[in-house]
Image (cartoon, rainbow, N blue to C red):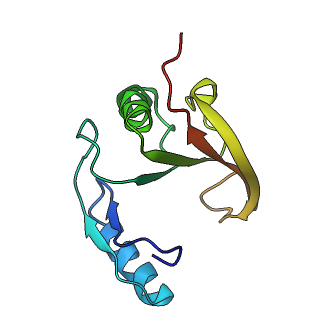
Amino acid sequence: MKAGAASVLAVDIDPWTETAIRLNALLNGVDVSSAASDLIGTGRDADVYLAGDVFYDKSFADRIVPWLSALAKDGADVLVGDPGRAYCPRDRMEMLSTYQVPVTRALEDSEVKKTTVWRFLNKELG
């Protein structure tokens, strides 16, 4: 919303994230809708899709990569933040930027995690 979006729908299959979304929106002074549902496979309904750290599991990556690729091919801007997960399909994306992000040592193996923002390419791969 702060970048000028007309509306934002934040979606996660974990119902606990709705509280985090609400608190983040309040802290940033923006209005954000949220839903605890699985949208994978649905048609394009937005101009921009943002996904964070979604390539942590092979079976989940196998589900989400074709969908994100199809959204990009259909003209959506699909951006993904990834901290170097094994199932990240780097061959289907272009690197935009890399950041050093402070993290909690209790959850990660270090105090800073290198995270890259990628854009899905909007073409078929041969």
Residue 121 image point, x, y percent:
55, 33
Residue at figure coordinates x 61%, y 37% from the top left: 85
Residue at figure coordinates x 75%, y 57% from the top left: 99
Residue at figure coordinates x 49%, y 86% from the top left: 28
- Left or right side of 107 for 50: left
Q: Note whether residue 86 is visible.
A: no
Q: Is residue 84 above or below residue 110?
A: above
Residue at figure coordinates x 70%, y 47% from the top left: 96
- Left or right side of 51 for 113: right
Q: Residue furthest front?
A: 75
Residue 89 image point, x, y percent:
57, 28
Q: Is residue 88 above or below residue 79?
A: above
Closest to the observer, 123 or 25: 123
Residue 119 image point, x, y percent:
58, 42
- Left or right side of 51 for 98: right
Specify the quadrant of the image occupied by residue 14.
bottom left
Specify the quadrant of the image occupied by residue 18.
bottom left
Q: Is residue 6 above or below residue 31?
A: above
Image quadrant holding the N terminus, namely bottom left
**How many numbered marks does the figure carry?**
0
Q: Is residue 87 above or below residue 108?
A: above
Residue 122 image point, x, y percent:
50, 32
- Left or right side of 106 for 30: left
Q: Note whether residue 126 is visible.
A: yes
